């Protein structure tokens, strides 16, 4: 039996990409019945970018760079706005 997939379509300023994911993978992250697939994928996008921004700034991948720190700070503000908690509170990992 092949796994049913969910296609996520991204369009950013006219540039498009499609990403296929196992549909049941998206369901694993559903916290409430009313939560849509698009909201779940959006949450994962914010989480992934926050994780990468954190790693670049705090774990030696970007060194000390004020511009990168500003980007990371803005990312963390957007994370907190979306999830109602800080990245550190959500992950148990803070500096």
Image: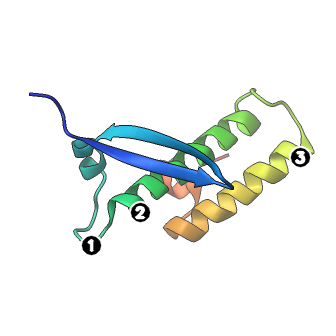
Q: Relative to 91, is 14 on the left or the right?
A: right
In primary-sequence order, the first of circles 2 and 1 is 1
Mark 2 vs mark 3: in front: 2
Q: Earlier in the sequence, mark 1 or mark 3?
A: 1
Label 1 packing within 10 angstroms: few (<14), some (14-19), many (20+): few
From the top left corner, tell me how far across and down residue 20 is, in percent: 37, 38
Q: Secondary structure at mark 2?
A: helix
Residue 34's mark? 1
Q: What residue appears at the point 28 percent right and 58 percent down from the top-left corner?
A: 30
The residue at the point 24 percent across, 51 percent down is: 27
* Between discs 2 and 3, the one toward the N terminus: 2
Tag in front: 1 or 3 = 1
Q: Which residue is mark 2?
A: 39
Position of residue 15 measured from the top left corner of the image (x, y, whole percent): 64, 47
| Residue denoted by label 3 | 67
Q: Residues within 10 Å of mark 2 (few under 14, many from 20)?
A: few
Helix, strand, or loop for circle 1?
loop
Which picture quadrant has residue 57?
top right
Left of 75 or right of it: where is 87? Answer: left
């Amino acid at each position: 039996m092949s796994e049913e997939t969910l296609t996520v379509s991204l369009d950013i300023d006219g540039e498009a990409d499609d990403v296929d994911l196992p549909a049941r993978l998206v369901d694993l992250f559903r916290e409430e019945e009313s939560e849509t697939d698009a909201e779940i994928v959006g949450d994962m996008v914010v989480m992934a970018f926050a994780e990468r921004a954190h790693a670049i700034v705090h774990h030696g991948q970007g060194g000390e760079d004020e511009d990168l720190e500003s980007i990371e700070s803005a990312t963390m503000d957007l994370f907190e706005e979306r999830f109602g908690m800080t990245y550190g509170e959500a992950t148990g990992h803070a500096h």
